[in-house]
Image: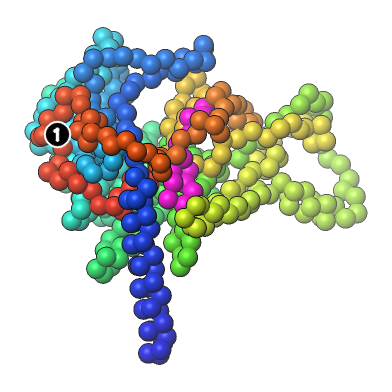
Amino acid sequence: MGKKGKKEKKGRGAEKTAAKMEKKVSKRSRKEETFLYNELYIYNIRKDTWTKVEIPNPPPRRCAHQAVVVPQGGGQLWIFGGEFASPDGEQFYHYKDLWVLHLATKTWEQVRSPGGPSGRSGHRMVAWKRQLILFGGFHESTRDYIYYNDVYTFDLDTFTWSKLSPSGTGPTPRSGCQMSVTPQGGIVIYGGYSKQRVKKDVDKGTQHSDMFLLKSEEGREGRWVWTRINPSGTKPTPRSGFSIAVAPNHQTLLFGGVCDEEKEESLEGDFFNDLYFYDAIKNRWFAGQLKGPKSEKRKRRRGPKAEPEGADKQDSGEACAHAPLEVVREVVAEDGTVVTIKQVIATPGSSTQPQSDEDDSPEEAGGPWVEPRPRSNAMLAVKHSRLYLYGGMFEAGDRQVTLSDLYCLDLHKMDQWTVLVEADPETQEWLEETDSEEDSDAGEGAEGGEDEDDQDDDEDSSEEDGGERSRI
């Protein structure tokens, strides 16, 4: 590239930096507000109802923490870390506290144990035997940020933390990754997000798509080893903010997420609502295509039949008809930011799973196609071979829209999503109040028995960390 080209590129970079600064000033003038919660809700599957459970002395309000359920003591819910931000954004910090909810007695307890992880958000935590295993995350302040790839264990019998030093080459520092336990007793780490400073005031984000296995060495207590693995099959496209759960067959299920690409004059956010399964035994990914809704139909027996002339052309047409559809929409925010939302929609009949000898007549299958809208950071849970999906968020420009809808999917039938609670457009919440005239007390959200030892030393955040938190 000649000197002229370099000057032009440098000029465009300066314009882009100026535009970012102008957007930050605009955000401040709009009095952006953030609301965090420490409420506890229980969903009753049989009654199809939500119930708010009031338990004294809960953990302080937070988000981007991790919660794990274990069977010990009649059932326990363990929570570690996360972050707090005051409504006006003037106060922000990461937690490093550990809490347990005793499900049998419905009581909260803060467990104080030295030697644990530093304050962080976006980490991942799983139950492994009689331990909690914690990996990664990030910490951010006005001065700097750091991503982690450290591993800690918490012993559920002795209530003690230990930092592991696995051998082998492990994942690079990251947050928002997949962390799941395999049927063989290993721990899989997949994907995630991180960023690094390439030069002054310029950060580069990376959406990881590599996979690693963390395994305890047999006969050597406390010794662990990292191994990089390369699964076959149909892998998820690079993304962050996806959600995972463990299916009844011990396969790991991955849903949704978002892939960001920043361009000169627009921010493209590709949100997803697709499903993938990872089979750790076969070390293989495959897409979780749905069969689609079906009306009453007659069965027909598959059998050998003569292929009419031009069958190849007909089969090709059917394959195209069953291929996933890609829908691209552009949303223009009030500040002029253009957001391109790409949605991949599976069509009925596109399932890659084997078909039985008896199949439905395609001409008699039909009905409305119901599915969750594309989103990131949804909550997933599996109960009685059904996958439950709650909430999440999507973005339009600088705004983040929270969702409160609830869906269910039968993992045996894999036919279609069922809407349990519909998303009400009137009650969808923008995580930004543009006309608010009320100033909130910055310390109001920090109630609930917190201790200075349970948070990091820096209580201020940079203006940019709001975008980062949405990806964890």
Residue 399 among magenta residues: yes
Q: Is residue 411 above or below residue 13?
A: above
In what quadrant of the picture does the N terminus appear?
bottom left
Q: Residue at x 20, y 53 (%)?
A: 142
On the question of residue 185 being in view, the answer is: no
Magenta span main SS: strand
Return the residue nearer the eye: 109 or 341: 341
Q: Crowding near pointer 1: few (<14 within 10 Å), some, many (20+)?
A: some
For mark 1, what is the residue? Answer: 454
* Figure quadrant of residue 14: bottom left
Q: In this view, does 267 lie above or below 76?
A: below
Where does the image place residue 412, in percent across and percent down from the top left? 58, 27
Q: What element carries label 1?
A: helix
Classify residue 86 as left or right of residue 359.
Answer: left
Return the residue nearer the eye: 131 or 66: 66
Q: Give the range drawn in magenta.
A: 392-410
Amino acid residing under circle 1: Asp
On the question of residue 33 being in view, the answer is: yes
* Figure quadrant of residue 447: top left
Q: Which residue is drawn at 61% across and 53% down?
A: 328
Classify residue 288 as left or right of residue 122.
Answer: right
Give the tally of numbered discs: 1
Most distant residue in the top direction: 105
Classify residue 52 as left or right of residue 336.
Answer: left
Where does the image place residue 181, in percent across and percent down from the top left? 35, 35
Where does the image place residue 26, in percent across and percent down from the top left? 37, 55
Most distant residue in the front direction: 437
Where does the image place residue 371, in percent across and percent down from the top left? 60, 35
Q: Which residue is drawn at 28% across and 61% down?
A: 196
Residue 388 among magenta residues: no
In what quadrant of the picture does the C terminus appear?
top left
